[in-house]
Image (cartoon, grey):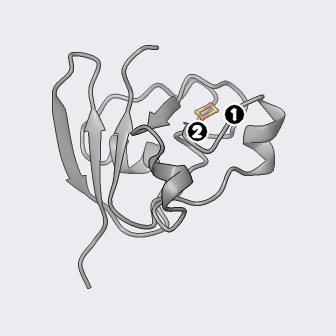
Amino acid sequence: MAMPKVTFILPDGTEKIVETEEGKTLLQAAQENGVEMESACGGNGFCTTCACKMKEGQAAIDEEKVSPVNDKEENMGVEGPDNRLGCQAKVIGDITVNIEDF
Ligand code: FES
């Protein structure tokens, strides 16, 4: 079965497309493929340095692409569905993720 593709939009505006196993977090997908994503709390959902944004409306339109917002994200005040914590959002299907500073 084809692995999901994650397109990361980097801070300089370029894109990096990586393949990852379904169920990995965006943070894992980034780190395993040399994409820089901050993770001050070690991926435990307590810091928001891994905050990222799904390409506009994508998560809302197709919730098959990424796991739903979880309790940790809600506790950190993350407003989904497009805004996510990279360490909590799990990849399901092909998705585009903006990790620009915003
Ligand atoms: S790495 Fe800290 S909230 Fe994701």
Give the CA distance from mark 2 to mark 1: 7 Å
Q: Please state the horizontal and vertical placement of residue 56, each as a whole percent of the image.
A: 43, 37
Residue that mark 2 sits on: 84
Residues marked 2 and 1 touching at CB (< 8 Å): no
Point out the tag, 2 or 1, that comes first from the N-terminus: 1
Please identify the residue farthest to the bottom as the structure is shown: 1
Report helix, strand or loop for mark 2.
strand
Side (left or right) of 32 relative to 65: left
Crowding around mark 2 (Cα neighbors within 10 Å: few <14, some 14 to 19, many 20+) is many
Side (left or right) of 52 relative to 12: right
Q: Is residue 67 above or below residue 6?
A: below
> What kind of residue is marked 1?
Glu
Q: Is residue 71 above or below residue 20?
A: above
> What kind of residue is marked 2?
Arg
Some atom of ligand 1 lies within 8 Å of the CB belonging to the residue at label 2: no
Ligand 1 shown in quarter: top right
Disc 2 versus disc 1: nearer the observer: 1
Q: How many marks?
A: 2
Q: Please state the horizontal and vertical placement of residue 35, each as a whole percent of the image.
A: 28, 35
Report helix, strand or loop for mark 1.
loop
Crowding around mark 1 (Cα neighbors within 10 Å: few <14, some 14 to 19, many 20+) is few
Q: Residue at image x 56%, y 52%?
A: 60
- Which quadrant holds residue 8? top left
Q: Is residue 31 above or below residue 9?
A: below
Q: Please state the horizontal and vertical placement of residue 18, each as a whole percent of the image.
A: 22, 52
Side (left or right) of 52 relative to 67: left
Some atom of ligand 1 lies within 8 Å of the CB belonging to the residue at label 1: no
Q: Residue at image x 74%, y 51%?
A: 70
Residue that mark 1 sits on: 79
